[in-house]
Amino acid sequence: MKKGEAVPVFKTLPGPKISRLDLGGALGTPQEKIFVCSGSQVRGFSKKGKQFLTFDANLTENINAMHVSGSDLFVCASYIYNHYLDCKDQDYFLSGDKINDITFLSYENLPRPLPVLACQDRVLRVLQGSELAYGIEVPGPPSVLELYNKDGGDEILYGTSDGKIGLLQIGDQTSSSKWEIDNDKKKGGILCLDTLDIMGDGVMDVLVGRDDGAVEVYGFDSSGDPTIRYEHVLSESVTSIQGGCIGKEGYDDVVTATYTGWVTGLTTEPQRAEVGPGDEVKMSKEMQTKVDALRAELESLQVQVLQGREQYHQTAQSQTAVSAVPVFSINDKFSLSQEDASYSLSLEVQTAIDNLLLQSDVPIDLLDVDKNFAVVSFSECDSEQHNGNFLLATYRCQANTTRLELKVRSIEGQYGTLQAYVTPRLQPKTCQVRQYRIKPLSLHQRIHSIDQDRPLNRLSLVGQFSLAEIHSWVVFCLPEVPEKTPAGDTISFYFQNTFLGTQLEATYCKAEGHFKSDNISTISILSDVLSKEATKRKINLNISYDINDESVSHTLQMIHPKLEYQLTLARKVQLIDALKELQVHEGNADFLIPEYRSILDQSASLLEEYKKQPAHLERLYGMLTDLYIDKFKFKGQNVKTKVSSLLEILDHYDLNTLLDFFNDV
């Protein structure tokens, strides 16, 4: 940076996409050598731009994570970790789930350096050589790792794709959690982290970049707990963040890079001058030069845009014009949110989005998102005609919108595809389609173990199927399961339903599969889908069940607080209009009983909550109906004729009456 201007030092020729960049150098010296990886190749450049290394890792997949430390090079493809010393193969590890990031610990009391892998299954894997030393469970899928102290030490920062941040102290045998920041405000996922003592209090602060464009600085209070000190929101996802002194000596800066390639600097240098009354604000020469340069640059860009547009129109009108479809890439994420049991779909394009069409062949609800300013309109779908349309919604975006965030909620047992047709503001008009699978048990999330004391129902399958085949069926049924069949003869996965809190254990091997859940409906859905998948492959299955009747009342007890809350909310919302009318008629609300006065006072928040949860009550009614039908289905009885009686009981809900009805054969 010279006089506030970014001056290029060197530039490489265009080539394959660079997936990772890291700084390295001999240990104990400034880390000023630049290492980048593209595909399965790692290249090294000096700070002047001279290429001194080309190393091909000979991996079958592209490198998606890399770390350099002295002569050690650590690279990870989707499931594979490799360690090279002076470009010679040292260690190798095959992970049970996708690797998102890697870092490396080395400090005085450590017998040997420890690589740490951030894996999609909510586990940080600490390695010793080619062996797994131990795993650390974290509260979300870890997307990024960063050493808390860049000079070394035993503390690692992690960020998760669902927006949580934590600090861990890691030893060669054990680890401990120092602190964790929850994502109560439902902010975006963490894409990048860095540390810098930007507050100047002698303690490293944490710099955070999120996928919703938020840039945050966390400091620490007197008790050592993290507190947010600064927040700034950019219009695009923040792909990289670094802290240091870049602009003016004595003032720290935070530099960010965003998805479409903008590099932005935030500085601690005061940008405003304070003056007394009657005094004039005088802009420094340096600031005046900056403003003038920015104005000139903007004018130059506007002229270039106008010239480009005119040139395009002239070409389009000529006889020899050839129309080429413009290429654009979409950065998308479709992930299950634990807090409200919904799927968050974020779409980001390198240019402004004109409109987005959503189409689904399964029933799903669209939920309100505060950050979404697009205008949505719905088209009627005649689902009875079986034309595969249950939802058709169009989002028309405001000018310069490059990122859209949506929330949808699915119904377990109903599975299919959600399609997003993205049309950017480009000429000629073009559109890209993205497809997202809605799985049969779509609201289940991976956990590390289940509560074996719950009343569990069991489903067992025996048949002539391979381990890879039954694994592909589990992938088809459940989210967050790795596509690749994990190593080993027997595989176990644990899940929790984010909506109800019921649990599921899946254990399977070649020719055998066992599933346990405290929810009969989960077992029923699995049984139907697995037998369908086996029939498609002409595989005979021997299916057996062990149904625990106590599990039904256990599931009803779990649904009870949610149902009671939703019924109370619906009743309060129904009263609001009548209470407001009474208030207008009487001139005040003093004559009302405290309960009704409270409903009036909270009317805005009650209506907002009710609006944010469309069909919540109907969804709970549907789950209870399915539970009732499934309970008797396993007994060989068809009770669909009694469903109307069940709905009558729900209209005058009482838990004991409902339990009696379920137990009445």
Image (spheres, grey):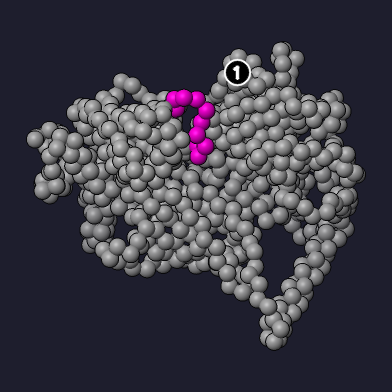
Residue 230 vs residue 177, the one in the foreground = 177
* Residue 298 picture location, percent across and down: 77, 67
Residue 476 vs residue 196, the one in the foreground = 476
Residue farthest toward the left in the current orientation of the protein: 665
- Magenta segment includes 32: no
Above or below, 165 relative to 597: above
Q: Residue at x 73, y 24 (%)?
A: 90
Res. 246 image quadrant = top right
Amino acid type at mark 1: Ala
In the displayed structure image, the side of residue 656 where residue 56 appears, left or right:
right
- Magenta: main secondary structure: loop
Res. 477 image quadrant = top left
Q: Residue at x 60, y 21 (%)?
A: 132
Residue 460 visible here: yes
* Residue 429 picture location, percent across and down: 58, 72
* Residue 520 picture location, percent across and down: 25, 35
Figure label count: 1
For the magenta stretch, what is the residue range? 482-491
Secondary structure state at the residue bearing disc 1: strand
Mark 1, Cα crowd under 10 Å, few <14 / some 14-19 / many 20+, is some
Residue 204 visible here: no
- Per the image, the residue denoted by label 1 is 133
In the displayed structure image, the side of residue 346 where residue 550 appears, left or right:
left
